Image: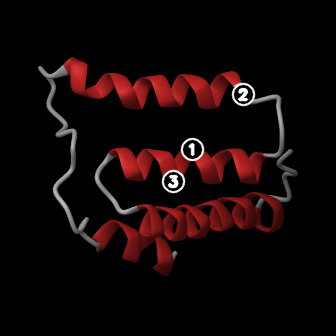
Amino acid sequence: MAAGVAVVRTRPRRPPRHRAAASNVPDALPSIALLAVYLALWGFGGFAPRTLLFLALLLMLFGETWKRSLVYAAIMTAGVVAAFQYGLRVTLQ
């Protein structure tokens, strides 16, 4: 939980390439496309590597450096896996 708060509270070192705005749909298209690919690959591979890659790419898309993106994605993925497998006792494939 603390790692998730640390991720949310940190600011990217460079300005994001895409700013969120309700009227600026074209800027949201890369995120939507990445989500569509993530969901299309749902049955392939394991949950953890697929989610790690998705989150890292999404964070890089939002302007985070690749190193920080990988670290944050690994922390978030580990937290989700731990919550589901140990907290909820649900196996993620």
Q: Which mark is residue 56?
A: 3
| Disc 1 and disc 3 in contact, CB within 8 angstroms | yes
Q: Earlier in the sequence, mark 2 or mark 3?
A: 2
Which kind of residue does numbered mark 1 sit on? Phe
Name the outermost residue toward the front: 66
Image side of residue 76 versus residue 89, left or right: left
Dot 1 surroundings within 10 Å: few (below 14), some, or many (20 or more)? Answer: some
Residue at the image point whose x is 54% and y is 61% from the top: 73
Per the image, label 2 sits on a secondary structure element best described as: loop
Q: Quadrant of residue 39?
A: top right
Q: How many angstroms separate mark 2 from mark 1 (CA)?
A: 11 Å
Residue 28 place in picture, x, y as percent: 29, 27
Residue 82 place in picture, x, y as percent: 74, 67
Q: How many angstroms separate mark 2 from mark 3 (CA)?
A: 16 Å
Image side of residue 80 versus residue 90, left or right: left
Compare residues 34 and 87 and report the one nearer the observer. 34
Residue receiving disc 1 = 54
Per the image, label 3 sits on a secondary structure element best described as: helix
Which kind of residue does numbered mark 3 sit on? Ala
Residue receiving disc 2 = 41
